[in-house]
Image: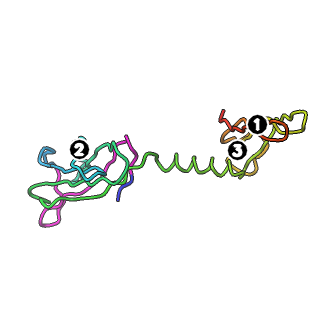
Amino acid sequence: MILGKLGEEVKEEFSVLDVSNNLVSGIPLSEFSSHLFNPSNVEDSTSVTFIELGHGHYRVMFTPNQVGNWMLAAYHNTYFPWGKTNTIQAFSNDFDSIALMLQKVLGLVQENFAVDQTVYDGANNLTSSRVRIYTNNTSVGTDNNVLETYIMTAVYSGITMTSYKMEKL
């Protein structure tokens, strides 16, 4: 299975061997064909491109436009008429952005988390503050390695909080 991101080109490499297990280079790219099925199991008209990398190694590429499992089959009438197939799992985010989102979630559940610039009303209710989350524990409370900054605002009616919001700056 290949992992990809929605809207970004997905690449799969393959080698072409003859009956003697020798790599075959110089195959005209027009001799390759493909079938591409989207996550709804419908053949997709998304453009599939082949390139030769060299020495009998090739690459097939396409850009997924839906999240989910795609199936790509590449064919050559002489060397693999049965097709070379693979599943491509397309996500809406890449793993680096998912890791960053998880780090932010951990911060919002108060890992590497600091509250400052606090403001209280006459009844000593916290009405606003700055909340910062950090990439590591040694930076908490400093201006270093701040991952995200939020402003918290709370409104009270007597002793009852009527609204609360956390806004990312």
Number of the front mark, 2 or 3: 3
**Distance between the alpha carbons at the discs numbered 2 and 1:** 53 Å
Q: Position of residue 110 (x, y in %)?
A: 72, 51
On whether residue 106 falls in the magenta region, the answer is no
**Looking at the image, is mark 3 or mark 1 earlier in the sequence?**
3
Neighbourhood count class around disc 2 (C-alpha, 10 Å): few under 14, some 14–19, many 20 upward: some
Q: Is residue 140 left or right of residue 147?
A: right
Which kind of residue does numbered mark 2 sit on? Val
Mark 3 — residue? 133
**Distance between the alpha carbons at the discs numbered 2 and 3:** 43 Å
Q: Position of residue 38 (x, y in %)?
A: 28, 49
Mark 2 — residue? 48
Residue 127, labelled with which disc? Answer: none
Mark 1 — residue? 154
Classify the position of the N terminus by image quarter: bottom left
Q: How many marks?
A: 3
In the structure shown, which secondary structural element does the residue marked by tag 1 occupy? strand
Number of the front mark, 2 or 1: 1
Which kind of residue does numbered mark 1 sit on? Ala
Are the two marked residues, 2 and 3, in contact with CB atoms closer than 8 angstroms?
A: no
- What span is in magenta? 4-25
Q: Is residue 139 left or right of residue 30?
A: right
